[in-house]
Amino acid sequence: MRVSGWVSLVVLGLVVALPVSAGKLYKWVDEKGNVHYSDCVPPEAAKLAREEKNQDGVTVKEVARAKTEEELAAEAAQRVKDEEARKIAEAQAQADRALMLSYTTEDDLLRAREQELGVIEANMATAKLTIASQEKNLSDLLAHAADFERNKKPVPQAVTDSIAHVRAQIEAQQKTLKEREGSKDTVHNEYEAKLLRWRELSAKNAKDAAAAAAAADK
């Protein structure tokens, strides 16, 4: 955006020559690189960057060009991204505070893990006993149905329904048992992550405390 020397001198002369009553003077550069001066901004230049000068030719205000739709959309997307990052950071800070308040030492954390795993193991043991009992019941029902078949008699509907019901119960208990087995892995992974984070925070807190103590001694 260059203006020839003589044009600059002419423009400067005009600016200097403006009386106090002339008020504001605006300067802008159009899309072709041409420099314009005027006491008002025409509609076609309203979105362009411009300078506002006083009667002494001194720039008193700068107005940035209007942003494009693409730029506005990008800024809106960035604001959403920044807000999501802020929420994640806030949630992490809350989780960190809860972690350090819940467990004073690593042993506290490990004990909590073993207690949670113990509950799962107890539930699994109960489920296994239930399955064993249901399998015994199913075996008895199947034997009862076999007696009817050996005697060339139709198996009563009540017996058939009971067999189907017990089988469904066994399947449900086996599914629950499998889910609880999987939950043990989940608990292990969760507490491993907690332990690593606890160690990181403990090291940071110790470092911050040492720095504060050193600063206090100075």
Image (spheres, grey):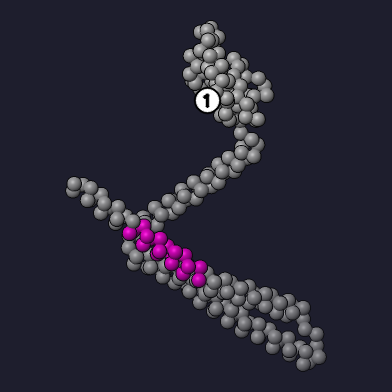
* Observer-nearest of 26 and 175: 26
Residue 145 in magenta stretch: no
Type of amino acid under label 1: Glu
Whether residue 162 is visible here, answered yes or no, is no
Residue at (77, 92) in percent of width and height: 150
User: Which residue in the protein does label 1 denote?
Assistant: 62
Task: Using residue 144 as the reference point, say whether residue 26 is left or right of it.
Answer: left
Whether residue 182 is visible here, answered yes or no, is yes
Image coordinates for residue 115, horizontal then vertical, percent: 41, 68
* Residue extent of the magenta highlight: 185-203
Q: Main secondary structure of the magenta part?
A: helix
Q: Is residue 181 shown above or below 26?
A: below
| Residue lying farthest to the front in this orientation | 6
| Residue lying farthest to the left in this orientation | 217
Q: Is residue 198 shown above or below 70?
A: below
Image coordinates for residue 28, horizontal then vertical, percent: 59, 24
Residue at (40, 57) in percent of width and height: 99
* Observer-nearest of 126 and 69: 69
Residue at (68, 24) in percent of width and height: 44
Task: Using residue 100 as the reference point, say whether residue 165 is left or right of it.
Answer: right
Image coordinates for residue 18, horizontal then vertical, percent: 54, 10
* Observer-nearest of 54 and 107: 54
How many numbered marks, from 0 up?
1
Secondary element at tag 1 = strand
Q: Is residue 127 shown above or below 31?
A: below
